Amino acid sequence: MHGRIKSVNFEDPFYQTCCIADDECSGHIEIHHHFKYKGSQQDVPFGILPLCVYHHSIEKRKDVKDRLDWVMLNRTTEADRVLYNRFNWYQLRAYLTKKHSR
């Protein structure tokens, strides 16, 4: 199922349920590559997120994308942010913090 993704332990409990986990969740868990860097998806643990079929089908919707950004951002380490330093982590955190602090 996930043969080409070597950097992720899919036995980790995080990958057993939808990372959005709200009342609308339905269907089995699918793997979503959320982190894109320099125009291509990356096989990095913080950017590979478990989504139910329903949320995977609407992952481009702004409210869902923002929630996925928040989950991804909170899974990064300082080393991740240094390695992918061309991605504006500060701007993403500022945007999401402002949006959710209203």
Image: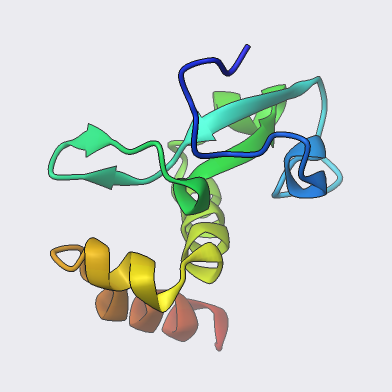
User: x, y percentage for residue 81?
Assistant: 31, 70
How many numbered marks, from 0 up?
0
Choose between 79 and 51: the one closer to the eye: 79
User: x, y percentage for residue 24?
Assistant: 80, 38
Residue at (55%, 79%) from the top-left corner?
Answer: 100
Residue 102 image-quadrant placement: bottom right
Query: In which quadrant is the N terminus drawn?
Result: top right
Q: How is the image coloured?
A: rainbow
Q: Residue furthest top?
A: 1
Horizontal side of 40 relative to 10 (left or right) equals left
Residue at (81%, 20%) from the top-left corner?
Answer: 27
Q: Residue furthest front?
A: 6
Choose between 91 and 102: the one closer to the eye: 91
Residue at (81%, 37%) from the top-left corner?
Answer: 16
Choose between 8 and 88: the one closer to the eye: 8
Against 9, residue 91 (above or below) is: below
Choose between 37 and 55: the one closer to the eye: 37
User: x, y percentage for residue 17?
Assistant: 81, 40
Residue at (21%, 70%) from the top-left corner?
Answer: 88
Against 56, residue 34 (above or below) is: below
Residue 18 image-quadrant placement: top right
Against 16, residue 64 (above or below) is: below
Q: Residue furthest right?
A: 23
Horizontal side of 70 relative to 62 (left or right) equals right
Horizontal side of 10 relative to 48 (left or right) equals right
Horizontal side of 83 relative to 11 (left or right) equals left
